[in-house]
Each structure stands twice: as C-alpha cells, then as structure tokens.
Amino acid sequence: MKLQRNITLLFLHGFFIKRFAFPVITLYILSYSISFTQLGCIAAAATIASILTEIPGGIFADKYGKRLSLILASTFAIIYGILLTIGNGFVPFLVAAIFYGIGGAFLSGTTEAMLYDTLTDLHRKKEYKKVSGRLSFLTLLTSAAVLSITPLVYEYNQKLPFIISVAFFAISFVAAYLTTEPPKTAEETIIAPQLQFSRHLGEAFRQIRSIPYVSSIILLFTVVTIFWYIFGDYAQPLLQLSGLNIIYFGLFYTVLRVLSGLASEIAHWLDGYFTIMQSIAGMLCIILIGFITVSIGKGVWLPISMIIIDWLLDVESNTER
C-alpha cells in the first residue's frame, strides 16, 4: 500500500535532510576570512528568514499539500548546499543562510503532520506518538553516527562534507517525491481555500492568550532559544579555544543528537513528577547556570556546559507540547 511506505520514506527524508557538514560549517565559513560580525549576520539571516516564513510555510502545507512542502524543503536545502560548496565569501554564504531558513520553515512540523495523516488514514491513529517517537529517535541516532566522521572527512578535503551534504539533500528530495499525499478530510477540503496569513496569525495569538502563562513561557524560551541557536554558530571556534581537537567535533555533535533523541522520554518522565511550571522553572535555572559556565568556563567544562544547555532546551520544547 502506497501510504504504508510513507513511514519509511519520511524516515529517509528526515535522515538525509540533516546537514552532514554541520559539525564543521562555522570553521569552513571562517576559513574564507569571514569576520565574527559577518558570521553573526549570516546566523541572524537564517533565523529571520525562518521566522518570517514559518506561518506562511504552514499555510502552504495545509493548502497545497505536505508532500509538496517536503519537496520544496529539500529543494531549498540543495540550493543551500550548492551555495556553500561553491561560495567563497560573505554574500554567497548569506544567501545560503536565507535559503536554509526558508527551507526549514517548509519542513517545520510538516513531517509530523504527514505522519499523523498517514497513520490516521491507515486506521493507526492511536500509534502516532509511538511511531513518531521511534522515527525521531532513529533519525537522530543514525544522523549522530554519521556526524561522528564529518571532521575526518573535512580534514581530508574541506569541500567534501558539503558535496556529500548536497548528495544527501538530493536523496531527501527523491524520498519526498516518492511519498503519497494522504487524502484530505471533508473538513480540511472546506477550510483549505479559506486559509489566509492574517487569519492564521490572529488565531494563533488568540489561542496563546487564552491559556494562562503560555505567552510568557513562549516569549521567555523563544528569546533564550534564538540566542542559543545564533550562539551555536560561534560554538565551533569556542570548542577550538577550549582545546578540543577538530576530529572530536563529530563526537561532540553525536552526543548532542543522541541526547536530543532522549529528550521526549525525559520530558514524559518529568510530567509524572512535576507540574509544567516547576519543570520549566528548574530547567531555566540550570540553563542560566550553563550560560554562566560557558562564559567563564575553560577546557572540558565548556563543551559539557554547551551539551547541558542544548539538551535542556530540547527537553523544554518537548515539555511545552
């Protein structure tokens, strides 16, 4: 059955859309005499592009189909990878970041939504959490294993990790193309033509305001998360300053991916012992301590603090759900 194979294809798409070159991207960009100010602009461009296209991307998926959204996400990723491969200065890297941000917006939530629709049509709706969690963990685990060799490939040839990334993105494109769009429900068929950006945005804000503390929590962790993701582009130079050899960068990011895969399980465990507010307050305190440690830490404490912050933000995002 065509819909049944969606589960495997979504796993393949999720795996190959991950950036093989991720552990060395910043070092690669800096090798072209890019200043830290320019690096910040590149990181900000990706973030702003993603934020501005997040809601339009969701509306596009609802209106024109999730399969097409996945195909576009892979297309933007291919363009991003090619620009990084052939780029040699600030402008091509900046444009690449914008394409990456837009592609991320088309990808955000689309895989989960398509999986949910697929399982619903297969009369396996109750298995969604189980299947989604398993796919997420397997995707992160396999990508973590692959990332461990990226620095070795980079040491051999600076361009090679980015060429491999483009090949991976191309495979993700094929996987997305081979998926089957689950049929729309009668309600979706009626609503889809009526979707408008302003209405979608207004409804989102109304739902946020209707739940106590939610707006404050979202604002707080949005600021922290955006800061952390932009800071992440400076992580690799900091890791070098801590004395960590580049060949171990892959191990560092492997640990991050594995812990990300366990984040949902930890969030579920916290739900059984603490209220959401208690969990978030506790994690926020530890995150603040982590930021302080990153700012003053040296040696092994620097990567350890970065791992703790990244993992807790993953746990927090799962707790919010």
Image (cartoon, grey):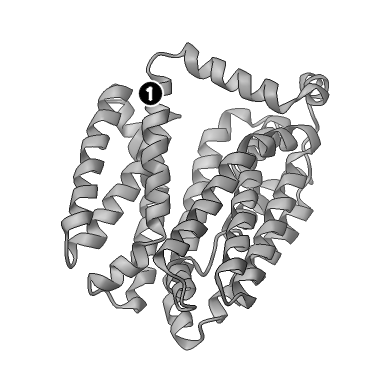
Furthest toward the bottom, the residue is 156
Q: Is residue 208 above or below residue 290?
A: above
Q: Is residue 224 above or below residue 176?
A: above
Residue beneath disc 1 = 216
Left or right of 194? Residue 274 is left
Q: Percent from the top left, x then y, of residue 253?
A: 38, 63
Q: Picture quarter containing residue 91?
A: bottom right
Q: Amino acid at mark 1?
A: Ser
Residue at position x 41%, y 21% from top? 214
Which residue is nearer to you in this view: 24 or 250? Answer: 24
Left or right of 107? Residue 242 is left
Q: Is residue 208 visible?
A: yes
Label count reads 1
Q: Picture quarter containing residue 189?
A: top right
Q: Percent from the top left, x then y, of residue 34?
A: 46, 72
Residue at position x 35%, y 77% from top? 246
Which residue is nearer to you in this view: 75 or 134? Answer: 75
Which residue is nearer to you in this view: 157 or 40? Answer: 40
Residue at position x 62%, y 19% from top? 202
Q: Quadrant of the C terminus?
A: top left
Q: Quadrant of the N terminus?
A: top right
Q: Percent from the top left, x then y, of residue 297?
A: 17, 59
Mark 1, secondary structure of its residue: helix
Left or right of 145? Residue 114 is right
Q: Is residue 274 visible?
A: no
Q: Percent from the top left, x then y, of residue 84?
A: 59, 71
Q: Is residue 288 above or below residue 46?
A: above
Crowd band around label 1 with a 10 angstrom C-alpha radius: few (<14), some (14–19), many (20+): few
Left or right of 10? Residue 231 is left
